[in-house]
Image: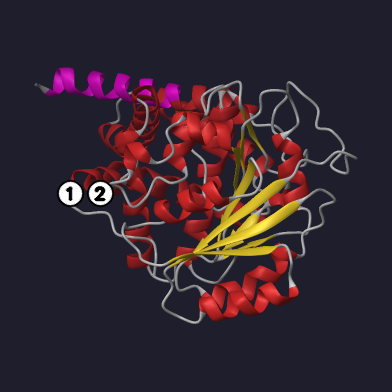
Amino acid sequence: MSFTFLWPFLFWLYVAATLFQLAVILGVFSKIPNPQSPIRNPQSPIPNPQSPIPIPISILLCARNEAANLRRHLPAILAQQYEGDWELLVVDDASEDESPVLLREWQQTHPRLRVLRVPEKKQPGKKQALALGIAAARYDCLLVTDADCCPSSPYWLVLMAAALTAKPGTEIVLGYGPLHPAPGFLNGWARFETAQTAIQYGSFAVAGMPYMGVGRNLAFKKKAYERAGGFAHHLDLASGDDDLLVNAAAHAGNTVVCLHPDTFMYSDAKKTWREWMLQKRRHLTAGHRYRRSHQWALAMLSLSHTLHYFLLPLLLWGRFGMVTVTLLLFARCCALLFLYGRLFPLLRESRLLSRIPIYDALLSAYYGAFVPISLMAPWRARSAWK
């Protein structure tokens, strides 16, 4: 291909990618409602969280060798303010540390706490333990989280339960799990990527295409889990107990997104880039099991983001269509800064706003290099359990 045809081709490819990005930012991401409202669905107002008829609900927490985290976070979960019947069911996934002893001690003083012991671990990941916990739960409404997570307030349970009953037909509530702030570039990047992912899956759900959720803050009804066949279709993967369940069971009529700050479920970010990359690669192994339409939508979103940043310096270097390229760059930057400027403070990530241009450019490298390499490499998913 001669340069005569190359530059127009690259130019129009850049225009198409950037216009697609603008359409998603303005037409999808911007529709996510104000997170100060407890329920993320514009079609129905939320009932009073202190409703006289609160639903009975089971909190499920699977833990393997998590004694330190259990000691650190269980008090906050057991301190939830909820007037209805509820239980905390901890599934001890064949722990080899002091977790069993610690849980027995807690049971003596906390009647809401139940413990289910898995005697032998037979599969990677936590699907075996979570499936046993779902089967053993006393109530049909479930709220799942992880041992290394801590609720932002004592109203996490009441607001997530209220979201689950906000309108007829609701079966799934997608919550948010931010990371604790800490010094360092990695922490800032991980927090940005976590918040950006929440905006993405939350806005897609509001737009009628829920495709994933996070297992550290997810509520659902047993019938949705059973209708999806549980974890039977992806037992061979260590990951996917959260996003593949949502991908199979969620649809526009049964899913809402709850981004109220009192429902945030915080966890610690990875300390090294190696740990972060291993975690993301494990999560990415579930992507090829998404519905085909979801795979195409996410691929187009990632590709357009990558092309926007990859083609930009080439076109500026070649001085081809510089006015249009600059205007499109400016338009996307304004749209993105307006979006994040509205949502990041409500997601309690205001300190990241000054670094948005850096993180957004890094996100294109993540989409363009890390994700394809992780998906194509002959890499076997590792268990998240200790």
Q: Quadrant of the C terminus?
A: bottom left
Number of numbered markers:
2
Question: Residue flagged by tag 2: what amino acid is it?
Answer: Ser
Question: Residue flagged by tag 1: what amino acid is it?
Answer: Ala
Identify the residue position indicated by label 1 in the image: 377
Q: Is residue 359 left or right of residue 277?
A: right
Contact (Cβ within 8 Å) of mark 2 with mark 1: yes
Q: CA distance from mark 2 to mark 1?
A: 5 Å
Decide whether residue 291 is among the magenta residues: no
Q: Is residue 339 left or right of residue 238?
A: right
Q: Position of residue 344 (x, y in %)?
A: 64, 47
Identify the residue position indicated by label 2 in the image: 374
Mark 2 element type: helix
**220 or 320, which lies in front?**
220
User: Is residue 329 shown above or below 348?
Assistant: above
Q: Name the residue: 77% across, 65% down.
A: 79
Highlighted magenta segment, given as a residue range: 3-20
User: Is residue 12 shown above or below 126?
Assistant: above
**203 or 59, which lies in front?**
59
Check the image and name the residue furthest to the right.
52
